[in-house]
Amino acid sequence: MEADITLIVNGQSQTVRVDPATPLLYVLRDQLQLNGPKFGCGLMQCGACMVILDDVAWPSCQLPVHDVTGGIRITTLEGLAKPDGTLHPVQQAFVDEQAAQCGFCLNGMVMSTVATLQQYPHADEETIRNGMMRVLCRCCVQHRAIRAAQKVVAANKKS
Amino acid sequence: MPTSRRHFLQTAGCLTIGFSLLGSTWAMAAEAADELPGSLGDYPRIDSWLEVLADGRVRVLTGKIELGQGIRIAVAQMAAEELNLPLSRVEVVLAETDRTPNEGYTAGSGSIENSATAVRYAAAAARQKLLALAATQLQARAFQLKTQNGVVTAPNGQTRTFAQLLNGQKLTDEVRLPIALKPKADYQYVGKAVPRPEMERMVRAQEYYVQDLRFPDMLHARVLRPLNYDSKLVQFDEKELKRAVPGLAKVVVNGSFVGLLAEREYDAKLAQDWGKLNVRWTEGKALPAGQPLKDYLRTLPNTPKRVQDKGTPTNAPTLRASYYKPYLMHGSIGPSCAVARFDDAQRRLEVWTHSQGVYPLREALADLLKIPVDSIHVKGVPGSGCYGHNGADDVAADAALLAVATPGRHVRVQWAREDEHCWEPYGSAMVLDLAARLDPTTGRLTHWHQQVWTDTHSNRPGGNADKLLPAQYLAHPRRPANDGTTDPSAGGYRNADPLYAIPNLRVDAYFFRGPLRVSALRALGAYGNVFAIESFMDELAEKAGLDAWDFRLRNLQDKRAIAVVERARAIARQQQTGENEGLGFAFAQYKNKAAYVAVVAKVSIHEEGTPYRPQLWAVIDAGEVINLDGLKNQTEGGMIQSASWTLMEEVKFDQHQVRSRHWEAYPIFHFDEIPYVDVTVINRPTEPPLGAGEAAQGPTAAALANAVYRATGKRVRELPLRPEKLTREV
């Protein structure tokens, strides 16, 4: 049943030996020891496990790992910062706005926003909210997340 | 521990002493100081709270756990402030047995009042001690010395670092009052919006949560649970399961407790999925579905308690009304998780947990496993936000049982989403009957009678295994019903006595044992009680033809309460409302002794009846502000969470099982629904800091209900405020 599966994760090619039906989330967390994507529901309902596939934010908890081979670029929260450690502008904005309490859903909010703003650098509030629609946050810092995204948009408009 | 009385005394003592100490006069402090503030009473030694490390950094030890409420930064600010240290030179150790003080549970908005206050005094005492050492070593007078960045400088320019001064010694002295605290005018950190350093760690996806712990030999486990609380295991074909999931490493069956262990997490999940379809259980006990829960709960046998009885009964009331609050879920985004390892040779158990109380959990585990308390080490590690007593303790017990059955290996138990939704202890449903009389000439309340029907709002394990979920399913089950340690009255009448000045006040509580598992959910009974009281206040005002703001102000005597309400009124007066829009407000002081909060809500009701994306303003007085942004974050989050509870949430069940098994069956706010929120803080630096994390829950609910009434003419007394209840009457 198991097979060697080659994935491109955060720009690096990684080969893991797993059942190809294993959801990507388990491979990222258990085989590749990444902390960014979180287990929240396993039902694609909460967004805690969000990753970016090429340019699309997508929950990883039900996605069979064999569906993301063949050169698809998988980005996790770990892959956003520059090699020198500089945070991605969206990460930085979330820190600046202190847009977290427990932080468990932060991954979903940041990954979704990165994908949204890549597509719509000048996104308005509704677009920002829509971009995070798949993400649930129970501490309820959503308004701070929206503010963080708006801050990035404001910077995008200037540059 | 003989906790409750002792704790009560401490809390009470803390408030009085704190008041005088942080007030204006030092002499009073010395007189009143027969008890140390906060948790210092139990742990008076400086080094219980604070250590100077060899590199000069300071380590703060708190018995509280970080739940996202920001206690880590708050205690760091306290220490950095009193010791004149940069924040980056302060590290914080969270709750861990045998290492940090035993501060019971991280609950009841008490972390600032108890832990941070203790750290403040311990740091001040440390500073005093370090200056005394420096005075001797540098041959100077203490008052001539300057302390900056962990270095003490004498007038002649000679310096010593904290570490040099101590030269390996520990700060073993006891804190003694009075202690000179740093003058508030010189504060660098306290009262400011200091960012939480762990934010960067979270956003970089560094290891942070208990879910992130990975040990080389770790097994992954899930636990099989039936559909009904009272089901028992009938049939389980282990061989068939092993055929279906070859990666399964081990199965532990003890009565109706079934643990499934695998080298890989996915295999444990597959085994659990298989179990859901193929394992047979008895049907269990029927749940009271198909009838209005509000009526049903009144019919349950109950234990009555007269909580307040002042003056004469409320005869011929001006108004009566009845309110209802359903069962609500904590709904942590990350299902509960724990890791445990049992060393067979040494008979020693280690547990990593996001429980709110590592020490009480340790005692409960000792009771469960029949091993000495001293042989168990419990380390608190942050998890997903819990908002009260969720599955954290239960999953730690799952992990402990499976670790003991698998000595020498780390066992990580991860609850599935359905486990958390179905098995967490909910916040109890409540029925509230209110009656009041007012004097129409003065607009003053003369009589008030509040009756509360509720289950307990605290079923924490304390030191008892009975309340740990898996203990109830073992071959020799432990049953909380029989242990006599449940306090049925816990939290149910929290905030049931209005803060308004009412000469004749009666509060009766009736404690039932309801159909669903329950325990502490953020604000406990205060959410239901304040919703009822503040809805009723609006109803009373209308009946008497009084302005809702004036009516409250006329009946309040507490100056700080009045200030909060007046500030909220000023905010409300700036708002315009159009057609189908309504403005409502509500006020409460949490527990009648913690933070004061007034909430203004503006709703707009569209055709389909949804108060979509309301606007919410809070005015909060939490005494002395420790971290301005932390206080705002808690209050903003509290309002949004409460709005989600109030507008859409309700745990549902049928005759056999809980139906709210996942997020689609228990909807909470999504991003498109998130209200606009704004928080105004009244800082009172000379007052003691007050617990604030739960203070917005009740006022938000009533403010929304009152706003909906203004917009639609429809008074909704039964939560949630679902659209079908809001469509306009013709």
Image (tube, coloured by chain):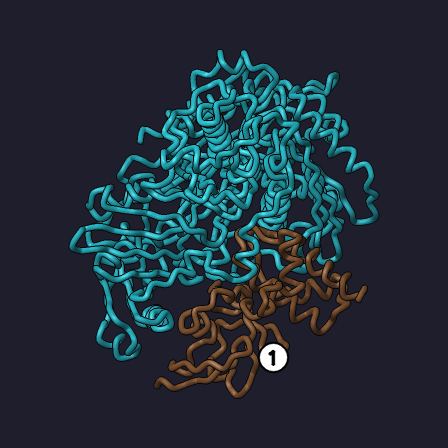
Chain colours: A brown, B cyan
Question: Whole-percent x and y of residue B42?
Answer: 37, 28
Q: Amino acid at mark 1?
A: Asp
Residue at the left extreme of this rendering: B345
- Compared with A74, B20 (above or below) is above
Please state the horizontal and vertical placement of residue B605, each as a whole percent of the image.
Answer: 74, 52
Q: Is residue A94 above or below residue A17?
A: above
Q: Report the residue at 33% width, 42% height from top.
A: B97
Q: Residue at position x 18%, y 51% from top? A: B347
Residue found farthest to the bottom: A70
Disc tally is 1
State left or right for residue A145 relative to residue B262.
right
Front residue (pair B510, A136): A136
Q: Nearer the viewer, residue B537 or B501?
A: B501
User: On what subunit does the disc labeled 1 rest?
Assistant: A
Q: Look at the image and tell me whether residue B102 can be seen.
A: no
Q: Name the residue carrying label 1.
A: A54
| Picture residue at 22% right of the left edge, 50% below the top | B348
Q: Nearer the viewer, residue B61 or B676?
A: B61
In the image, B203 versus B516, the foreground residue is: B203
Coordinates of residue B368 in the picture (x, y in percent)? 24, 47
Task: Decide if residue B669 is on the left or right side of residue B259.
Answer: right
